[in-house]
C-alpha cells in the first residue's frame, strides 16, 4: 500500500509518513484489517487522531462503524463514544463514556436509552447529585434518594425517607449530620434519642444528649432536652441525684459497635474506606432478626450479600446433610458472605442460626449500586479483596 511500510499484524511498528497516515488508517478499516488499523491509530499523534475523528464524524454511520471498532480496541473510548453519537445506540455510547470516565455524558446517554436507573447512578458518580436525585425521584427509588439527600447536606429530608422505609439506624445516621448551629438541631437530637432508646441503646442516647448539651448553648437551655434526659435516666432505673455520674458512665460505656457500625468497619475489605464512604455504606445496611434454626446461608446456593452478626450465634457446617461436619460457631462481630459482594460464586458452607440472631445485611444489588456511585471506595475495596484472596490462596498452598 502506498505510503506505508514495515510489518503488519505481526507486531512491528508501522512506519507511515504523517501525510499518508490518515489515509492509511481509513484504507485498513475499509479492508477490514482491524488489528493493523488499531496499531497505526495508536502510533498517530494526538493532532492526527483528532483530525481523523473529526473527518470520520462527517461520514455516514455505516462508514464510521469500522473506525469505531478501531478506537475501542485502541482504548480511545471517548473518541469511540463521540463517533457513535446520534447513531441510535445510546446504551453502548453511555457504556463507552463510562469507560472513559465521562460520567455526565454517560448519564445523558443512558437517559436517551431509557435506562433511568443507570443514568441516576452515573449522575451520582459524577457528583451531579441534584440531577441524580431528580431521576431517583421519578423512579420512586426512595433509598437512593435518601443517600443523595445525605450527600447534599439535607439530613431531615433523608431522615424522613428512612423513616418511611423503616430503617431506624439509617435515620439516626442521617440526623447525626445536623450541626449544632442548625435551627432544628434540638429536634434532631430528640429524634435520635427516641430512636436509639427504642432500639435498646439507651446509654448511647444519653451520650448523644450529653454531647448536644456540651456543644450548643441553645441545647443546654432547652427544656425538652432536660425532660428527655430525665426520661432516659428513669428508663435505666437510676435516681436523678446520680445524673452527672451516670451521664459520664454512659459516655464511657457507649460503643458504636453496639449498632453494628464498628463490626462493619472491621471487615478487611473495607479497611481503607474514608469516614464518609464508610457512613454511606453503613446506611445501606438493614437490621434483620433471624429465628433459631433458620438457614442463614445455604451451601451451593448463589450468594446474596453480606451478613454481620451483632447478637446471637450461628453454626457453620460443611453441608446441609444431617451428618455434615461442624466447622465453626460464630458470634457478634463475625461476618458471612462478603465474597458474594464482589464475586458471583455459590456459597461454600451451610450456616444456621443457633440462637436468635440480630445482624446487619447488605444485599449484593445495594452493594453494586454503592460501587457504581463511589469510585474511589470501589478501587480500594477491589484492591483489598484481591490481596486477601491472594493471601488465602498462599495459605492453602503451603
Image: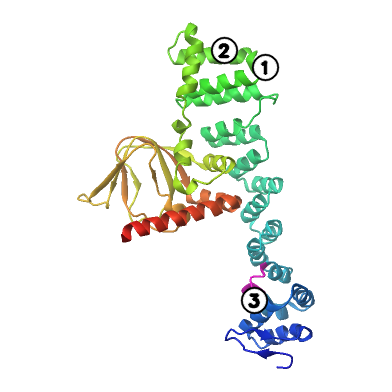
Q: Quadrant of residue 7?
A: bottom right
109 and 237: which one is in front?
237
Residue 78 image position (x, y, % from top left): 69, 66
Q: Quadrant of residue 293?
A: top left
Relative height, residue 32 to residue 166 (above, below):
below
Q: Which mark is residue 217?
A: 1
The residues tagged by marks 2 and 1 sit, at their Cα atoms, a distance apart of 16 Å
Q: Which residue is mark 3?
A: 69
Kindly identify the residue that appears in the image at 44 percent across and 25 percent down. Answer: 200
Residue 176 image position (x, y, % from top left): 59, 30
- Callout 2 crowding tier (Cα within 10 Å): few <14, some 14–19, many ≥20: few
Relative height, residue 191 to residue 85 (above, below):
above
215 and 299: which one is in front?
215
Label located before the other in sequence (3 or 2)? 3
Q: Which mark is residue 227?
A: 2
Which secondary structure lies at badge 2? helix
Q: Which mark is residue 189?
A: none
Amino acid at each position: 500500500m502506498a505510503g506505508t511500510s514495515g510489518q503488519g499484524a505481526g507486531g512491528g511498528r508501522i512506519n507511515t509518513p504523517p501525510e499518508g497516515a490518515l489515509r492509511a488508517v481509513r484504507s485498513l478499516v475499509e479492508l477490514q484489517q482491524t488489528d493493523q488499523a488499531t496499531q497505526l491509530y495508536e502510533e498517530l499523534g494526538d493532532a492526527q487522531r483528532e483530525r481523523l475523528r473529526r473527518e470520520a464524524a462527517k461520514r455516514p454511520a455505516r462508514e464510521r462503524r469500522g473506525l469505531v471498532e478501531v478506537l475501542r480496541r485502541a482504548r480511545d473510548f471517548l473518541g469511540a463514544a463521540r463517533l457513535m453519537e446520534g447513531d441510535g445506540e445510546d446504551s453502548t455510547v453511555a457504556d463507552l463514556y463510562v469507560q472513559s470516565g465521562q460520567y455526565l455524558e454517560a448519564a445523558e446517554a443512558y437517559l436517551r436509552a431509557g435506562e433511568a436507573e443507570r443514568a441516576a447512578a452515573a449522575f451520582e458518580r459524577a457528583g451531579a447529585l441534584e440531577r441524580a436525585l431528580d431521576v431517583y425521584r421519578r423512579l420512586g427509588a426512595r433509598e437512593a434518594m435518601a443517600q443523595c439527600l445525605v450527600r447534599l447536606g439535607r439530613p431531615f429530608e433523608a431522615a424522613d425517607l428512612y423513616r418511611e422505609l423503616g430503617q431506624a439506624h439509617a435515620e439516626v445516621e442521617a440526623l447525626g449530620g445536623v450541626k449544632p448551629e442548625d435551627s432544628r438541631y434540638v429536634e434532631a437530637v430528640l429524634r435520635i434519642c427516641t430512636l436509639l432508646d427504642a432500639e435498646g441503646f439507651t446509654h448511647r442516647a444519653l451520650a448523644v444528649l450529653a454531647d448536644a448539651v456540651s456543644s450548643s448553648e441553645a441545647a443546654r437551655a432547652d427544656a425538652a432536652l432536660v425532660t428527655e434526659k430525665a426520661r432516659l435516666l428513669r428508663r435505666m432505673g437510676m435516681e436523678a441525684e446520680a445524673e452527672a455520674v451516670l451521664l459520664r458512665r454512659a459516655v464511657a460505656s457507649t460503643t458504636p459497635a453496639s449498632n453494628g457500625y464498628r463490626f462493619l468497619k472491621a471487615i478487611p475489605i473495607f479497611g481503607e474506606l474514608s469516614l464518609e464512604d464508610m457512613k454511606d455504606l453503613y446506611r445501606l445496611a438493614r437490621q434483620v432478626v433471624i429465628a433459631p434454626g433458620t438457614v442463614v446461608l445455604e451451601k451451593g446456593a448463589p450468594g446474596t450479600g453480606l451478613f454481620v452478626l451483632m447478637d446471637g450465634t450461628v453454626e457453620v457446617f460443611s453441608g446441609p446433610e444431617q451428618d455434615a461436619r461442624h466447622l465453626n460457631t460464630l458470634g457478634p462481630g463475625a461476618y458471612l458472605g462478603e465474597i458474594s459482594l464482589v464475586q458471583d460464586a455459590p456459597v461454600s458452607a451451610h450456616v444456621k442460626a443457633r440462637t436468635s440472631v440480630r445482624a446487619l445485611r447488605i444485599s449484593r444489588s445495594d452493594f453494586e449500586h454503592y460501587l457504581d456511585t463511589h469510585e474511589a471506595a470501589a478501587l480500594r475495596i477491589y484492591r483489598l479483596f484481591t490481596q486477601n484472596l491472594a493471601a488465602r490462596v498462599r495459605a492453602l498452598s503451603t
